[in-house]
Amino acid sequence: MIDKINDILKAVRDFKASDHGEIEEFRIKYLGKKGLIPSLFQEFKSVPPHLKSEYGKLINDLKDEASEKLNSLRASLAGTTESTSFTDLTRPAKNMFTGCRHPVSVVRNEIIEIFQRLGFTISEGPEIEDDDHVFTKLNFPPEHPARDMQDTFYIKRQDREDCRPDDILLRTHTSSVQVRVMENQQPPIRTISPGRVFRNEAISARAHCIFHQVEGLYIDENVSFADLKQTLFYFAVEMFGKNTRIRLRPSYFPFTEPSAEMDVSCTICGGKGCNVCKYTGWLEILGCGMVDPNVLDYCGIDSKKYTGFAFGMGVERAAMLKYQINDLRLYFENDIRFLHQFRSAF
Ligand code: PHE
């Protein structure tokens, strides 16, 4: 029996396998139910008692060695396909999961890119602002409802006794950045300010207390409403497709005069009327107007010499129109099933 054990041990040690099939044959031959090693355990039953401990150890060692060999054979072929001789090297590799941008980033970058093509620079500013930059220099009268606690998050500074309780706030629009640009720079100014803004609103499918804007400003000699209209028309066509039409409706903003709201022809029905555009054929996309001369003067720009236009839009809203997203809250939930639908070069 000793010879038999040694023969098997030698065979186990010498065994070499080049594919999974051979490894499986090895397992069946030595370790399988009817394999050589289990049969040794059968024979062991008839070994005389005084030899049992010696033989038992030999057989157990053999079994351990064969099991280890099996594991190392398997490990050496791990990562190869079941049967290497039939591997199809032309088969496409498994898709690798790569991350994707959030739809708000995708659309914000797209908006930025369109205006950059028209020569607009990008300007950024603080999210925590003062009343001057968010309201006063933008010609908001002291009693204007947007200053109301309803709409604005005010921040009380603990460290400054002299600080008015309504002076420090979270910006409600990125027009504040444009005030900073005008204070520091003389025309020509052509800039957009993308960024996060904050409004004290109840969260619903159509409103959120945090959202993103891209606002634009162009100031130079002889800038006219026609320039505003053509710029925004170019933007609408680039953003929503070449058959897009625009319309401007009179509106009111303290910092522009005249002011307008711009609609684009419905991205779903093309203007015929559907439930997305509520059968009007139009979707509201942004606010705009000619910069009020008061604003220019407050910011140190000669309103007799220069004129300008400004516009501002919500990025979430633009993305909703572009991708037919019907609930604003989806942007904030980070549900992978939603986010994975936006794959883009931007
Ligand atoms: N600042 C305005 C808003 O937050 C948008 C706007 C910007 C309107 C510039 C007109 C001109 O809604």
Image: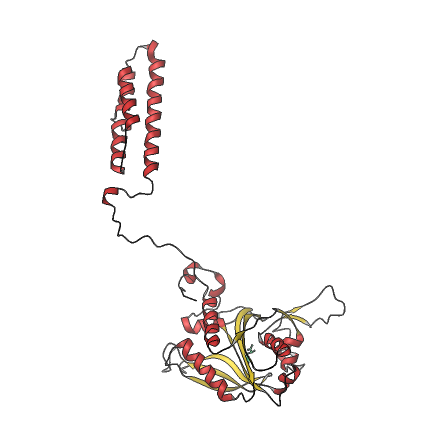
Residue 123 higher or lower than 227, as above or below: above
Q: Is 150 above or below relative to 30? A: below
Up-down: is 236 above or below 333? below
**Ligand 1 quadrant?**
bottom right
Compared across the picture, whether 198 is left or right of 341 comes to: right
Whole-percent x and y of residue 232? Answer: 47, 82
Foreground pick, 184 / 6: 184
The residue most toward the right is 161
Q: Quadrant of residue 246?
A: bottom left
Percent x, y for residue 52?
34, 13
Q: Residue at x 48, y 61 (%)?
A: 333
Q: Quadrant of the C terminus?
A: bottom left
Q: Quadrant of residue 184?
A: bottom right
Q: Residue at x 47, y 69 (%)?
A: 109
Q: Is residue 27 left or right of residue 295?
A: left
Residue 130 lies in quadrant = bottom right
Q: Position of residue 98 (x, y in %)?
A: 41, 57
Q: Is residue 236 left or right of residue 187?
A: left
